[in-house]
Amino acid sequence: MSNLDTVLKEAMMIDGAIGVALVDYTSGMTLGQAGGAALDLEVAAAGNTEVVRSEMRTMEALGSREGIQDILITLTSQYHLIRLIQGQAGAGLFLYLALDKGRANLAMARHKLALLERNIQI
């Protein structure tokens, strides 16, 4: 099992996880995914690529030197968490995690996703 498969499998063990994907936001392509029976991770990856690009353009227009750690989208019954991969090896990549709002602990999910992000080897 590759490092990426292990990270995705561990992300699916986060309470409330519905699906997870590693996405290249320069192309919108999914590099790996797990779960997602309740949603189309390919469509979500492509759509969230636009969210990431838009936020990066906004931060640049504001002249901000802050790096984006994560982006949260809150739906009626779900959380969608986008975690940008830090460092040179992960440039242009993000982890996308969809969570069931009723079963997830958002703070814990953010913490665990941050830990997993550090373990990704590309």
Image: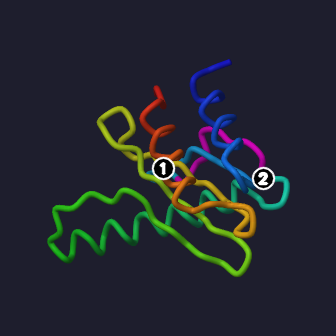
- Residue 115 drawn at (x, y percent): 46, 39
**Rendered residue at 48%/31% (across/down):** 120
Eyeballing the image, is 121 above or below 53?
Answer: above
Residue type at mark 1: give it. His
Q: In which quarter of the image is the N terminus?
A: top right
Locate residue 5 relative to residue 89 in the image: left or right.
Answer: right
* Circle 2: element type: loop
Residue, far top: 1
**Rendered residue at 70%/43% (across/down):** 12
Q: Earlier in the sequence, mark 2 or mark 1?
A: 2
> Mark 2 and mark 1: span between their CA atoms?
21 Å
Locate residue 97 relative to residue 64 in the image: left or right.
Answer: right
Q: How is the image coloured?
A: rainbow
- Residue 109 drawn at (x, y percent): 57, 53
Q: Within the image, what quadrant is residue 86 found in?
A: top left
Contact between labelled residues 1 and 2, with CB atoms less than 8 Å apart: no
Give the magenta-colored segment's residue range: 28-36
Is 107 contained in the magenta span? no
Q: Within the image, what quadrant is residue 59 found in?
A: bottom left
Is 29 contained in the magenta span? yes
**Rendered residue at 50%/51% (across/down):** 27
Eyeballing the image, is 101 above or below 104?
Answer: below
Residue type at mark 2: give it. Gly
- Residue 38 drawn at (x, y percent): 83, 60
**Rendered residue at 52%/46% (across/down):** 113
- CA neighbours of label 1 inside 10 A, class few (<14), some (14 to 19), many (20+): few
Eyeballing the image, is 114 above or below 45?
Answer: above
In depth, the one of 79 and 31 nearer the eye is 79
* Circle 1: element type: helix
Q: Residue 36 carries which label?
A: 2
Locate residue 9 relative to residue 91 in the image: left or right.
Answer: right
Name the residue tied to disc 1: 111
